[in-house]
Image: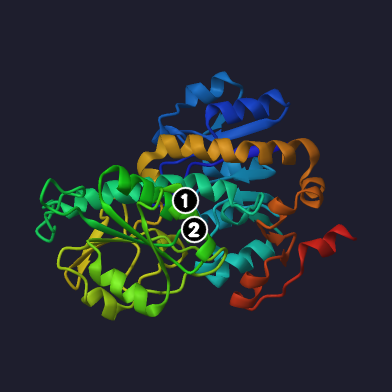
Amino acid sequence: MIVGIPKEVAQEEKRIALSPAGVDALVRAGHTVYIESKAGEGSHFSDEEYEQIGAKIVFSPDEVYCRSELLVKVAPLLENELEMFQQKQVLFSFLHLAVGRKKTIENLLAKKITAIGYELIEQNGKLPVLQSMSEIAGQLSIQLAERYLENFSAEGRGILLGGITGVAPAAIVILGAGVVGTTAARAALGRGAQVIVIDNDINRLKEIELLFNKKVTTVMANPYTISRGVKFADVLIGAVLMKGEKTPHIVSEKMVKEMKPGAVIIDVSIDQGGCIETSRITSMSNPVYEKHGVIHYCVPNMPAIVSRTASYGLNNSLIQYILDIVNNGLDNVLMGNSGLSKGVCTYKGFCTNEILANTFEVNYKPLRVFSTN
C-alpha cells in the first residue's frame, strides 16, 4: 500500500504522526511511504532521517495527496487540504468533526473518503491514541498554570503553586477524572498543590482516591459543587470529555465572574468546544487572554508544545493500526477490529457515525451494514 504523510498546515502544528521508526516498520513490510519535505522538521526529524530508511521525500502537498492510498495526519482537516484529496482515499487523523463545519462532512462524503478519527478509536474500553495526547496535556496544564500564576503578566496572581512553610499552596480544581484530570492531579500533587477533582462518575472518583491514597479531594459533580469549586480555585482545569460530541459548558460566565482576581483557567476541552462558557480558541503564539479578571489559556493542540515527545507518543499508539491496515486491507481489519471501527466517521460516501449524522443532518448508515454485503 502507498502511505502519505503531508506536512501539517494547521496553525503552529509541529507534530508528525509517524517517527522514523514507524516509517521504517512500514518500509520493511514492503510498503511505500511518501513524506512531504520538512514534515518532520517541527519535531526535529530531518528529511535525511526518513530518506535513509527508505521513505520517498516529495516537495509539494499535491504529490503526497495524489500518490497515496492512505493519508496519515495529525491535525483536523483544513478546507484547502480537503480540496487535495482524491476519490476513495483513506484518512487517518484527529478529526473532531463534531465541532467542525458541515461542509467538511459533505466533502468527505462527496469524495467517498474513509475518514478514521484517532480520538474515537477504542481498545478495552479506553481511547488509546487520544490517551497519549491526554497524558501530555494533563502534565502541561500544570506547567502552564504554574507559569501564569506568577506575576508573568500584570494579571498574574503572584502565587507559588506549592506554597511555603506557613503559606498555603495554590488550589487546583480539576473538572473531569479521566486521563487528563488524573495526569494533571498527579503533576499538581508532585508540586505540593492542593488538588480537588470533580466528576459525575463515582467509580472514577474512587479510582482517584485509591491512586493517590486520599491525598486528592474528590467531589461529585453537580451545579452546586461546580460553582463552589470554581469560586475556590486558583487554577481551574477543564478536562471534560464527551466522546465524539461537542463538550457542554458546565462552567457559566456567571461562575467565572466570581473567581479570584488573577485566577487561571486551562480549558483542555477546547478542541471539542470547551467546557467553560468564556473559553475561546487561542494559539501557541498568543495563548492567553483575560476576561472578568481571569486568565484563560485555550490552545487546542497543547501537545504540539512538546512536539517531539508528542510525535513519539502518536507513533507508538498508531503504528500497529497502520501496519494492520496496510498488511491486511482496511475492510478486513475493520471487520475484525470493533475498536478501530468505532473511529470510522465516513466510509465510501456514507456517514457511519450516528452522532455526526444527527448533528449535521446527513444520512447515517452503520458500518456493520457494509460487512454483511
Which corner quadrant holds the C terminus? Answer: bottom right
Amino acid tagged 1:
Leu
Where does the image place residue 201, in percent across and percent down from the top left?
51, 66
Determine if residue 239 is in view: yes
Residue 372's disc is: none
Residue 43 position within the rendered picture, expressed as x and y whole percent measured from the top left: 42, 34
Give the Cα distance between marks 2 and 1: 6 Å
Q: Amino acid at mark 2?
A: Lys
Q: Quadrant of the N terminus?
A: top right
Q: Which residue is mark 1?
A: 210
Q: Secondary structure at mark 2?
A: helix
Mark 1 neighbour class, 10 Å CA radius: few under 14, some 14 to 19, many 20 or more: few
**Number of marks in picture:** 2
* Residue 64, image quadrant: top right
Q: Residue at x 72, y 72 (%)?
A: 364
- Circles 2 and 1, Cβ within 8 Å, touching? The answer is yes
Q: In the displayed structure, would residue 256 be above or below residue 331?
A: below
Asked whether, in this view, residue 218 is left or right of residue 179, the answer is left
State the residue in front, 223 or 41: 223
Residue 299 in the image, given as x and y percentages of width and height: 35, 56
Image height of 360 relative to 121, above or below = below
Residue 12 visible to the viewer? no
Q: Is residue 77 left or right of residue 13?
A: right
Which residue position holds label 2? Answer: 206
Measured as percent of width and height from the top left, residue 208 is found at 45, 54
Q: State whether residue 290 is above or below residue 70.
A: below
Write the residue at 61% across / 66% down.
Answer: 105
